Image (cartoon, grey):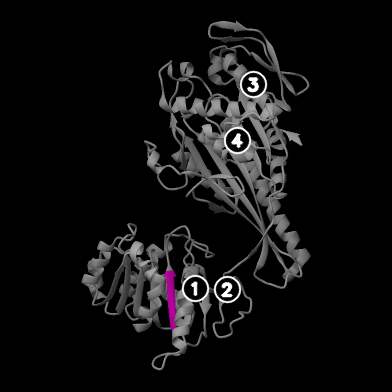
Amino acid sequence: MESTRTFLRVRPLNHVERKRKDKVAVVPGPGGQDVKVLTAVEGGRKMEAQTFLFDRVFGPAASQHQVYTACAAPLVDAVLEGKNGCIFAFGATGSGKTHSMLGPEGGKRQDSQAGVLPRAAAELFRRIARLESDAQLAIGSSGFSAYEVRASFLEVYCENTFDLLGGAVSGSREAASACPLRESPDGRVFAEGAQERVVKSVDQLLAVVAEGARARATASTGVHAHSSRSHALLILAVEHRWRDVGESNPRAFKSQLARLTLVDLAGSEDMERAHAGAVDRAGVKINLGLHVLTRVISALAEGGSRHVPWRDSALTRLMQSSLSGRATTYMLACVTPATREAGISMKTLGYATSARSVQLRPVAAEVTEDFDDDPMIGDVEDDDVALNRRSIWIETAVGDVFARCVGDSADPMILYVHGSGPKNSSMVWNDLAVELMERAKGSETGPRSFFHVAIDCPGYGRSPGDKQMIRSYAGGLIRDCVVALGRRSVVALAGSSQGAAAVFNCALEHPKLAHVLAVIHPVGHAPQRFTAIAQPTLLIFDTEDAGHPVAVGRQMRRYLQQPHYFEFTSSVDGDWVCRHTGEELWRL
């Protein structure tokens, strides 16, 4: 059992306060664990001096390294041990929260002024590299141990939760575009539909943070020209996967997932100071969330059977996993020492010290046993000799491309391309490839087997590179893949979504590269160009798929020389693609 650890940072007087000749009212004690507010005025009433106790107090001369070492380094240890960790920064606007958490230039200037996040990220990736290297030396080829870090960035604004990485966030923050909050079987509250980005370096993570920060709601207040008008949660999911030495099944593995959550609470100043008393909707909602967080902390501190109002605010629902006792949780309170702000500073100090009474019992995340059902996970022998499923790397002019293969490489080839979406992967073609292999076996006319190759486009799946490559260099990329595999042409090019557009563009640029085209849920630009496409072309559209409008498909049918066109309605016909694509492609 341990308590929530609370830390205080008292920043130096800034140039405005010095110019105003403000006096110092918040004085850290000599022992490094207490702070005294000498004088404060609240509501026109002078308040008596008061002393507050913390686990550690950082004075104006404290370095960023000292803050990181105390406040975040133990959380990196916890996450790598499989335990959840959380640090949340609290304080009025302009109190030094952003400087402490990020540092100058959003953390990109990784020097002595770098904040908690870039330092924690650097240590996390350094430790992961060391752990993977040590594991490789210890277990060799008889097992494996690997880590993956995924980042998500959420904003709580006016009691709605928005995904800051999900594209452009509406400036009006319409509730309709918010992510609904759901609860997983293990009790974790999450924002449904929010993106998780795989990050492999400090620079990649800071780029994600910068992208999200640009979308975050800010506004000018009476305290700061760019005050955060929302709460923000950066969540780093650290997954460790490994296979024990002696495990006979090459596709079996164990997994443990821990999360490090960094919470930047919006400025806690009141309406009088922020907007000269004017009612501000975002400010009201900010203070509501902070008020509910105060009630939650008070209820947890008292313990017993007292009701904890988690559901009264989106902020507290998202922080429930961190505050409910199963995570290592730290609070970093930030204040200015200026006499003018002493009343607000005293409120911050009182709020932060109450969190010290919250009791925690951090436990490691459950280790799960799983089975990778991807038959092409690596260079392992396929149980089905006839299918001979395996993975390869194809060398192209734009870099190496990962691909999954089925069948004998000497047989006529079908190349599959799926080119967009968060789940982009060559795995979408697995079932179709296997079905066509089975159909070919029973064929009395035509080929008795095919060589099926499904690629992960650059930037998607396991292929490194720029995601725009499949859009801007489609013909060259597909041709490179065909030539690298020793062919001048393929029996068929099959594409889905953006991969379908790539198939059409390739057919226009290299008309003799494929004998048949097949596109599922296609997108395409300027279909009038398709009059130049002579190949038989299979087109399949779902009339209810707004992302791939059937109106575009009907234009394609009009301009193509040999269209084999199918429409279905998923709510009526079910998974028509799964049932009929193999049959129709085989006919062509």
Q: Give the alpha-carbon distance from disc 3 to disc 1, as whole Å.
A: 58 Å
Check if residue 583 falls in the magenta segment. no
Evaluate if marks 3 and 1 touch, with contact meaning CB atoms under 8 Å apart.
no
User: Looking at the image, is mark 4 or mark 3 nearer the viewer?
Assistant: 3
For disc 4, the marked residue is: 101
Quick one: SS at disc 2? loop
Q: Earlier in the sequence, mark 3 or mark 1?
A: 3
In terms of depth relative to the viewer, which is nearer, 391 or 585? 585
User: Looking at the image, is mark 3 or mark 2 nearer the viewer?
Assistant: 2
Mark 4 crowd level (few <14, some 14–19, many ≥20, 10 Å Cα): many
For disc 2, the marked residue is: 375
Tell me where residue 315 appears, x and y as whole percent. Answer: 53, 35
Above or below for 472 versus 329: below
User: Looking at the image, is mark 3 or mark 1 nearer the viewer?
Assistant: 1
User: Looking at the image, is mark 4 or mark 2 nearer the viewer?
Assistant: 2
Q: Is residue 248 left or right of residue 109?
A: right
In terms of depth relative to the viewer, which is nearer, 433 or 125? 433
